Image: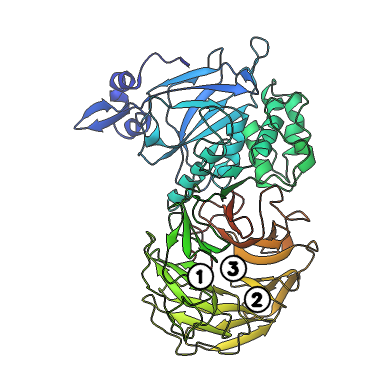
């Protein structure tokens, strides 16, 4: 480290206090001092040490910035906590931040950026195109033992995980109301890469979890040729491969961001940037199907209790809840994939659980297709309710309102919960206390043939996928049916009121207008891509889990245009008969893999939504 300013933050503020009285004082002393009773006092942070490498070469003379993520909108408002001090790397690539910063709060998300420097070339060389970063996480988590290794691996991991919050020029920020989504993205970055070693996977990756390390190393290798240069001719191929439309990158971090934000673009061109002497191994030996990045959790006997996972739902803090068809437990994973318990939350009312929804107070509602032996013998199926901490609140389960072999559930903003009853061909509406709103036999009895899915519009109407049709049911029980489909298994409502259906039987995606008319039918899917579940992100993009095909189809909602490759996204991930898809406040896609008893997180690919999902999606 070379701290070229010999005046420490405390001395700087004392010597220049008169200049800073008023507005200047607050702005300039923000990173090193505070004002109390007219006196200036220091609030130094811990000494932080680290190293910057390009490939396997140290980068000397790189400028180091420690940023606090902003809260004025996505990709905006970040503040360099080291300003006005200047920290650079020495001839071994090492640096030390001697405490000249202060955390705005313990939970402020911070990250380190290295700009420019000499990546082992002749003396006097500087690479102005070199920009790399490492996502550190909570500022309050930094200690004197924190070591930060910045290289292409930590850069690529940051670009993937923080894709929805990272703007050009290494500016990270979220809206003031989505601090949770931002923090959870930093957690994903820590699972992908280890910032202490500059390698993968991350030290926080839970037991049994896997990530696409070879793909990460391959993208890091693609960046390395530019990083280990003077920033001119060697960077041209990278910037060309990372250019999509008018978005032309000027540095290595922006190039990585362009690539991961457009995972179906220029796939081979990016892969071919890897040199024969690749610095990071093991790397891919052939081009990937796309440039998405996934983390997959579960897969062991003590990894959360997954046993034929069906639907999943996400709560306000980003926890992922999963209904299991077997074993009579509900699984819950933290945003970082850590199971709440080794074997899940047991429930006396759980049996062949299928659907799940989270209500506005964080309770989980789970549909049981069968009744527990000895209980509810006159009823087939029930609904179980769990507290946010996983305590069963419903005993053997609720059975009123026409519940009969219920499959899917959705929660409303008013506390009511809707259920799709496959067995009785009806819709059930329960109040938040489990009492029936929809009478003894449910709404639309026999009008919702073999209904399997349900979603809500902004007027509290429930839309059901039924055999050959989409059916709208009002809270008072008025029923309208619209012929549209063959065998719909997934349904979602977007921000403009359009209804999107995964038509399993017709191997297509169907869009209906708010009045139920067919607006678009997208059937140009590969023959084996059988759509199962559908979700809408914060900007109206449509994401579909393909049960057969083990992939994800993406559609621009406003134009009904496919944006995924012919085989779909995620073919490099261990997707295995994905039953359900959901989106969180970080822009991650979560999918349940029914055949491998795992859940997969595809990081940063979608526009974030507020969770839990209550009606049409909204931005957090």
Query: How far across and how far down the image is residue 260, in percent?
Result: 66, 43
Query: How far across and how far down the image is residue 459, in percent?
Result: 50, 77
**Gap between marks 3 and 1 measured at Cα:** 9 Å
Q: Nearer the viewer, residue 173 or 548?
A: 548
Q: Residues within 10 Å of mark 3 (few under 14, many from 20)?
A: many
Q: Nearer the viewer, residue 199 or 134?
A: 199
Q: How many marks?
A: 3
* Location of residue 193 with respect to 444 vertically, above or below: above
Q: Nearer the viewer, residue 235 or 506?
A: 506
Q: Which residue is mark 1?
A: 615
Which coloring applies here?
rainbow
Query: How far across and how far down the image is residue 360, in percent?
Result: 41, 66
Q: Nearer the viewer, mark 2 or mark 1?
A: 1
Q: Residues within 10 Å of mark 1 (few under 14, many from 20)?
A: many
Q: Secondary structure at mark 1?
A: loop
Number of the label disc, if any, that sits on residue 303? none
Left or right of 567? Residue 421 is left
In the rendered image, which quarter is residue 433 located in? bottom left
Left or right of 300? Residue 549 is right
Q: Which residue is mark 2?
A: 513
**Gap between marks 3 and 2 measured at Cα:** 10 Å
* Residue that extends furthest to the top in the rendered view of this protein: 123
In the rendered image, which quarter is residue 10 located in? top left
Q: Say whether residue 562 is visible.
A: yes
**Gap between marks 2 and 1 measured at Cα:** 16 Å
Q: Which residue is mark 3?
A: 494
Mark 2 or mark 1: name the one nearer the start of the chain: 2
Left or right of 181? Residue 129 is right
Query: How far across and how far down the image is residue 250, in percent?
Result: 67, 33
* Residue that extends furthest to the left in the rendered view of this protein: 37
Q: Nearer the viewer, residue 112 or 589?
A: 589
Q: Say whether residue 76 is visible.
A: no
């Amino acid at each position: 480290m070379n701290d070229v300013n010999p005046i420490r933050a405390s001395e700087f503020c004392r010597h220049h206090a008169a200049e800073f009285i008023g507005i200047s004082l607050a702005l300039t002393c923000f990173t090193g001092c505070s004002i109390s009773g007219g006196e200036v006092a220091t609030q130094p942070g811990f000494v932080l040490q680290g190293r910057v490498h390009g490939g396997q070469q140290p980068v000397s003379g790189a400028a180091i910035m420690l940023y606090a993520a902003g809260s004025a909108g996505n990709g905006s408002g970040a503040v360099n906590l080291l300003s006005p001090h200047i920290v650079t790397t020495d001839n071994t690539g090492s640096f030390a931040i001697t405490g000249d910063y202060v955390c705005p709060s313990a939970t402020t998300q911070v990250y380190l950026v290295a700009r420019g420097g000499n990546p082992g070339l002749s003396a006097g060389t500087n690479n102005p195109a070199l920009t790399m970063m490492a996502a550190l996480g909570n500022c309050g988590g930094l200690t004197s033992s924190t070591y930060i290794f910045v290289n292409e691996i930590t850069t690529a991991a940051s670009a993937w995980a923080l894709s929805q919050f990272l703007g050009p020029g290494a500016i990270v920020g979220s809206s003031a109301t989505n601090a949770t989504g931002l923090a959870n993205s930093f957690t994903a970055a820590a699972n992908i890469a280890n910032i202490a070693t500059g390698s993968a996977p991350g030290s926080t990756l839970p037991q049994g979890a896997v990530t696409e390390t070879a793909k990460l190393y391959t993208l890091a290798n693609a960046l390395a040729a530019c990083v280990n240069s003077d920033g001119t001719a060697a960077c041209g191929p990278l910037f060309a491969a990372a250019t999509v439309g008018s978005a032309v990158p000027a540095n290595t971090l922006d190039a990585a961001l362009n690539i991961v934000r457009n995972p179906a673009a220029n796939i081979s061109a990016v892969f071919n940037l890897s040199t024969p002497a690749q610095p990071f191994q093991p790397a891919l030996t052939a081009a990937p199907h796309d440039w998405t990045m996934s983390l997959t959790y579960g897969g062991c006997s003590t990894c959360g209790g997954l046993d034929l996972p069906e639907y999943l739902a996400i709560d306000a803090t980003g926890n992922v809840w999963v209904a299991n068809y077997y074993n009579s437990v509900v699984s819950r994973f933290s945003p970082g994939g850590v199971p709440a318990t080794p074997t899940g939350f047991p429930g006396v009312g759980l049996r062949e659980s299928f659907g799940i929804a989270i209500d506005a107070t964080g309770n989980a509602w789970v549909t049981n297709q069968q009744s527990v032996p000895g209980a509810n013998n006159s009823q087939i199926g029930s609904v179980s309710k769990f507290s946010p901490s996983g305590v069963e609140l419903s005993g053997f389960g609720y059975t009123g309102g026409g519940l009969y072999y219920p499959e899917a559930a959705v929660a409303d903003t008013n506390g009511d919960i809707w259920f799709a009853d496959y067995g009785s061909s009806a819709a059930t509406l329960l109040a938040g206390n489990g009492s029936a709103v929809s009478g003894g036999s449910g709404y639309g009895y026999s009008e919702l043939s073999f209904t399997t899915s349900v979603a809500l519009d902004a007027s509290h109407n429930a839309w059901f996928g039924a055999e050959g049709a989409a059916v709208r049911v009002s809270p008072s029980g008025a029923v309208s049916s619209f012929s549209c489909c063959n065998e719909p298994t997934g349904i979602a409502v977007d921000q403009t009121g359009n209804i999107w259906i995964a038509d399993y039987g017709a191997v297509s995606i169907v869009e209906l207008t708010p009045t139920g008319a067919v607006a678009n039918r997208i059937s140009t899917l590969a023959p084996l891509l059988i759509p199962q579940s559908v979700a809408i992100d914060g900007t109206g993009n449509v994401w579909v889990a393909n049960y057969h095909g083990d992939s994800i189809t993406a559609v621009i909602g406003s134009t009904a245009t496919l944006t995924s490759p012919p085989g779909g996204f995620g073919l490099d991930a261990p997707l295995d008969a994905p039953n359900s898809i959901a989106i969180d406040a970080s822009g991650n896609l979560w999918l349940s893999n029914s055949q491998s008893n795992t859940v997969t997180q595809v990081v940063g690919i979608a526009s974030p939504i507020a969770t839990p999902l209550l009606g049409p999606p909204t931005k957090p």
